[in-house]
Amino acid sequence: MSVREKVNGTLDKAKSCIFGQDDLLDSIMAALVCEGHLLIEGMPGLGKTMSVSTISKLCDLNFKRIQFTPDLLPSDLIGTMMYSQKNETFSTKFGPIFTQLLLADEINRSPAKVQAALLEAMAEKQVTIGDNTHKLSSPFVVLATQNPIEQEGTYPLPEAQLDRFMMKVHVEYPSLKAEMNILNLKLNFLDKLEAVLSTDDLIEIQEEVEKVYVDEKLKELIVTLVHATRPSSEHFVQKYKDIIVAGASPRACQWLYKIGKYKAWIEGSDFVTPSHIMQICPSVLGHRLILSYEATLEGMSGDSVAREIAEKIF
């Protein structure tokens, strides 16, 4: 069985357990292959946490979950130095962040200090405890869930942290048919799941995805698309002058390029097409666009603006 067949088999197995969240499961797999962090937003009870748990079991990855709360401390996440009176020495107690797949549940319920501690790990894939810096394992992927920010008791994520996320996925309510299937789901189905993919398989997949061809003209279109979101750029779409306050960073270019290659590979194509970029554009660019207060009041979203700009460029 080829690694592409294994990935498709993993997704098929996950979709037979988690109903109505196919886009979410596809995005989680893309995050694992591309080693990017994923922000998952949706109302409670839609299967966000269960989806992450299912994929981690099928991929045989070290998995830890931490529930973010307003009283959480940075040391609860990354660890701390412990003093032993018996030996009169300090030792390092490692936190749950030392894993391959970290589920940060309801990340927007944690205060700024905890979010700042997570930022170093997401950006540099390392953690500083005391005077020592510790490298995190590979792959290291943060899958963070959050309820919509208008819910009570939440802290909106700062722009610097939002930019660290490869994509932001919005989870919607399942269809009637999918919700009927949920009623027949056994509570202990996770215990019966067996791993389909291994860490070695993920490394092999990454090598295959790297070989996917991207034409120079498409690379130029990707960069032009990102520049078109920046008010200071000559490529900026003037229609959005009073709508976009700040555009996407160069990280957006990198992720459009990487995820585009993955999308082409999973479909069995040897090269990336504009349609692959269009598929992922709202998820990659939407959370990176800072819209004006007036645009937000009118109900505009970064996703819809990003899609409109992409349609003009492509």
Image (cartoon, rainbow, N blue to C red):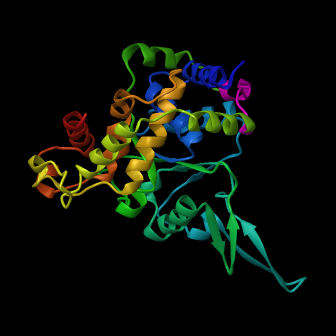
Where does residue 131 sit, x and y in percent of width and height?
A: 68, 81
Q: Is residue 9 magenta?
A: no
State the image quarter where residue 284 is shown.
top left
Q: Which residue shows up at 37% across the image and 19% down it?
A: 175
Residue at the limit of the structure toward the right, as seen here: 87
What is the number of callouts on the image? 0
Q: Which image quarter holds the N terminus? A: top right
Relative to 291, 70 lies left or right: right
Is residue 113 depicted above or below 194 in this figure? below
Q: Nearer the viewer, residue 276 or 287?
A: 276
Relative to 157, 138 lies left or right: right
Where does residue 203 sit, x and y in percent of width and height?
A: 68, 39
Q: Which residue shows up at 44% across the image and 30% down it?
A: 272
Q: Which residue shows up at 47% across the image and 28% down it?
A: 271
Mark yes or no: residue 191 visible.
yes
Q: Nearer the viewer, residue 97 or 186?
A: 97
The magenta region covers 189-199
Is residue 224 depicted above or below 112 in this figure? above
Q: Nearer the viewer, residue 178 or 288?
A: 288
Mark yes or no: residue 21 visible.
no
